[in-house]
Amino acid sequence: MNSDFLRDKAIETQCVQAGYYPENQDARVMPIVQSTTYKFDTADELGDVFDLKVAANMYTRLGNPTLNWLEEKIAVLEGGVGAVTTSSGQSANLFAIINITKTGEHVIAMSNLYGGTHTLLGTQLKKFGIDVEFVDPHEPLERMKQRVRRETRLVFAETLGNPALDVLDFAKVSELARFADVPLVVDNTFPTPYLCKPFEFGANIVTHSTTKYMDGHATSVGGVVVDGGNFNWDNGKYPELTTPDLDYHGLVYTESFGPAAFIAKTRAGLLRDIGATMSPMNAFLTNLGLETLHLRMERHSENALRVAKYLEAHEKVEWVNYPGLESSKDYELAQKYLPKGCAGIVSFGPKGGSAGARKVIDTLQLATLVTHVGDIRTHTIHPASTTHRQLSEEQLIAAGVKPDLIRLNVGIENIDDILADLEAGLAKL
Ligand SMILES: *Cc1c(COP(=O)(O)O)cnc(C)c1O
């Protein structure tokens, strides 16, 4: 068994089997290689590794067998040419952007992003002189195209916006990226490749916070950048990929790594210099989670749809947002891009505004209050006073976060128990 064998298989099989391919008498289960270093026989051999002439692990900041196996699995799941794991979803998004942008350049990002990504792009990257322009994802394509500049280097979006749950209009946004002749970078954290594979819809780079559904058990913070290998970097905009890298004796990424140039540079440049490396232990746990991703995503989606329908019919609920509901403004986009289900996150507003929302959260018992999503356990959070509290009221509205919004992470417990908990909580209003 190897990567080629598994690339043709169904995603359920890939979840279980891809990534780690043991040979005769090797451990059957992916081992944790808890070592920072690797032994070499000769100085020349190690020298070649430093020059990127030979792919081998020499120091765990840049690569480790356990990380490599997980990266291989995620690349297979997404249908990409390669992946780099990172210490968090934040560093994955940072890497995906700064790998190909620098001071004076411009990024077009949808405005409905995860709060942490919003501040990463709008605050931190801005400090480095990268001009991130946030755009209403519902804006017409023609208006979006007018925002493209000579300095534009990428378009950034989330498949399912966190927490507004807008479904990305891939046709529109990938057309924008093609028009600008820049890659479309998509954070696919919420759907995971089980529910949506962005490379099939025009994305060129995919990122994840593996902390969420990929791990699934709330044990490990992590991230990953996946390269679709489907963008032509040779258009004059990406000299860092198409001209000699003096740090590596004049190596040219597009010449040495072909379609995997982007991801090779992510590892050789960013992991080397910034060092936001995932730990082997976290990679082991994330892989363990991925082995059941298909089963979990199916149940999360099924339970969430039941919860959304229940809330929609409830007299103490003002509104419900779940793209799987026929009443959702994004129902058609969800049918098109998320036909297997819309994952486990439902947002809703109970009667009584922000105070009502906090009261419901405080009275639920099965659904605990935590800062997390994508866990097998049912959870709640009140984004306006927590994950998104740094944003101004204007930014909150742009991000789709109403003051009364409860974000419910619907777990994989028995659906009747989840509904009974919500019933008891709403009864207190
Ligand atoms: C959580 C999250 C992130 C950040 O990931 P961390 O692993 O917490 O650093 C980025 N994007 C989305 C969509 C997320 O949900």
Image: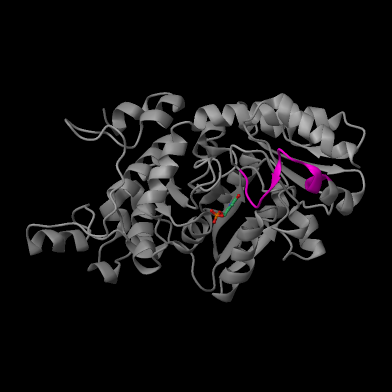
Residue 406 within the magenta-colored segment of the rendering: no
In the picture, the quarter occupied by the C terminus is top right
Is 334 displayed left or right of 382 in the figure? left
**Front residue (pair 62, 172):** 62
Magenta residues span 360-373
In the picture, the quarter occupied by the N terminus is top left
Locate residue 253, reporting x and y percent. 31, 57
**Front residue (pair 365, 376):** 365
Locate residue 334, reporting x and y percent. 68, 32
Q: Is residue 154 above or below residue 309?
A: below
Residue occupying image coordinates x 14% and y 64%: 47
Q: Is residue 326 visible?
A: no
Q: Is residue 135 above or below residue 379?
A: below
Locate residue 107, reporting x and y percent. 58, 62
Is 74 displayed left or right of 203 in the figure? left
Residue occupying image coordinates x 58% and y 75%: 127
Q: Is residue 297 above or below residue 213?
A: above
Residue occupying image coordinates x 38% and y 53%: 263
Is 411 displayed left or right of 53 in the figure? right
